[in-house]
Amino acid sequence: MLQLNKDNQFRILVIADIQVWIPLSSDKQSYIRKLIQTASPDLIVLLGDMVCGPLMLTKRRIHAVIHSILAPIWESGIPYAFISGNHDRDARISLEDQIHIYRENPNCITPLLSERDCKGAYVVEIMNNNNNEIAKLLFIDNGATQITLRGVQYFPADKTQLNYTQRLLQEEVKTPIFVFQHVPVPEIYQLIEVKDAFSNGSVRGHGPYRGKYLSLKNGIDGILGEAPCPSWTNTQQFMDWKNSRKVAAAIFGHDHKNSFRGEVGGVSFVQVSCAGLTCYGTDSLRGGQLLTLYSNGEWSTRPLYYRDIM
């Protein structure tokens, strides 16, 4: 059971897109170690694409790479949770086998697929010191891909995940829900201004926005360094979040060069930039994200960039 800390808070360090294919050196591990020291979290969430699956050709290499990522976390003794991204799913071993590696340490709270009510999702409750629930964390494995004539496409939440979420949202408990999933929902584009011509700071669009130029709308806090790359298949997922009025925020990775926060239909979208040092990205944005939950139901979030803490 996860509970508020002595300051009556619950601090979550989110780490996305390390995306490596060889074991982390001690120097690179020190960046994760510093993130943990700075955040002083009660939980660490690994938000997918920890490994670059296609470039690892043996099970032994995958095992060694995941161990190298987890070493600083294991040293900390802090509980941690893992969800998959597209590159984890591209690895030469199954997601279930990967979770077995993460669970080699007893501080891993991620259940095996075979232990879950829904294979593609699971929930963790955060309790106050009186054992009353103050928040739910909903973890959704997504990022499966398919190759089409239009390029790589990302699958949206499937029917079992949608049904599981709907059942959760229909429960009488009214504590806020925080969703963690790797690939953003298409509605993230409601935070984006689309133009026909380049303007200062805009980025090129792709997919349905090919030939367009994109920038964050006025009032959206953060940086857009690349066109968001959600699943282009729109499902009921976001509408379920919105209509329930229970989802406080959805936290996404996947788009390495983006770090921003904005509200869509009463749901805050938090886009986390990449933590990896060797994958593509913007050096000034590399790092993690700190999400803090408070006993009164409020919450806050802020990026933790390596440039500010190393």
Image (cartoon, grey):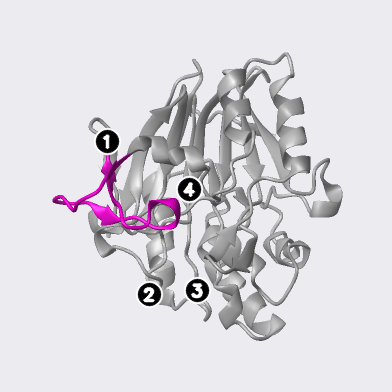
User: Which residue does the numbered mark 2 point to in the structure image?
Assistant: 27
Name which quarter of the figure residue 152 lies in: bottom right
| Circle nearer the N terminus (1, 4) | 4
Quadrant position of the N terminus in the picture:
top right
Q: Which residues are magenta?
A: 193-216
Label 2 vs label 1: CA separation? 38 Å
Residue 232 vs residue 277, the one in the foreground: 232
Q: Which mark is residue 217?
A: 1
| Circle nearer the N terminus (3, 1) | 3
- The kind of residue on which mark 2 rests is Asp
Element class at badge 1? loop
- The kind of residue on which mark 1 rests is Lys
> Looking at the picture, how far across and down is residue 164, in whole percent?
76, 35
User: How packed is label 2: few (under 14 Cα within 10 Å), some, or many (20 or more)?
Assistant: few
| Circle nearer the N terminus (2, 3) | 3
Name which quarter of the figure residue 106 lies in: bottom right
User: Which residue does the numbered mark 3 point to in the structure image?
Assistant: 20
Q: Is residue 191 magenta-colored? A: no
